[in-house]
Image (cartoon, rainbow, N blue to C red):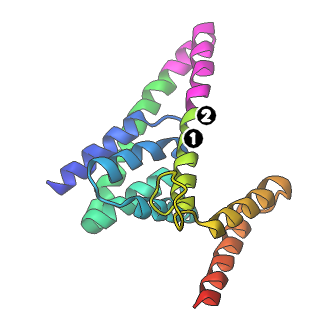
Amino acid sequence: MTYLHLFLAFLQIGAFSFGGGYAAMPLIQEQVVTKHAWLSQAGFADLVTIAEMTPGPIAINAATFVGNQVAGIPGAVVATIGFILPSCIFVTILAWLYQRYRKLALMQGVLKSLRPAVVAMIFAAGLGILITTLFLNGTISFVFGNFQYRALILFLAALVCLRGLKWNPILVMAGCGVAELIAQLALK
């Protein structure tokens, strides 16, 4: 039964997540944390970090990771297949439709209208991850001891390095990891 739940949860995510892996993260969070409680909110934040650091698309990495956490390697396979199956079907149909009707103004209008929704989904995912990272209880509350100042400093430093200095994202992630390791060792 667990395999069926994994398959159906990731089939639903795969069917309704448009705009790439980051746009799928709120849907994954809803299924994995809220609906099925397969991971805690902190576990989800760790999942995002691991899925981002490993090679491949973030959403597929997330599906594989969750499936493995819930039901081992067979669960990872089931969740991954559930996630990619809708895309395989949709892309095949859309490729055929696009080839047939690509010159129509209506087709171009539909594609343009999807862009704002995709941006909003990516923003929501990023904001959710930022809140989980900065606040220990996962919600915005300025209670003493709930805010993680070191995470804010690392976030701002990474933002400056990525956007301002145009550093390689892998180097920035590694640098943040080393900085956190040093901070953890210094506090012991």
The kind of residue on which mark 1 rests is Ile
Residue at the farthest left position = 1
Magenta segment, principal secondary structure? helix
Asked if marks 1 and 2 touch (Cβ < 8 Å), the reply is: yes
Q: Quadrant of the C terminus?
A: bottom right
Answer whether residue 163 is magenta in the image: no
Q: Position of residue 51 (x, y in %)?
A: 50, 61
- Give the residue pinned by disc 2: 119
Q: Residue 48 bears which disc, if any?
A: none
Residue at the farthest top position = 105
Residue under the point 33% across and 47% down = 31
Residue under the point 66% across and 62% down = 152
Which is more toward the observer, 14 or 89? 14
- Give the residue pinned by disc 1: 122
- Name the side, left or right, on which 179 lies relative to 7: right
Which is more toward the observer, 26 or 6? 26
- Name the side, left or right, on which 67 lies relative to 182: left
Estimate how packed mark 1 is, as few (under 14), some (14 to 19) or many (20 or more) residues with alpha carbons within 10 Å.
many
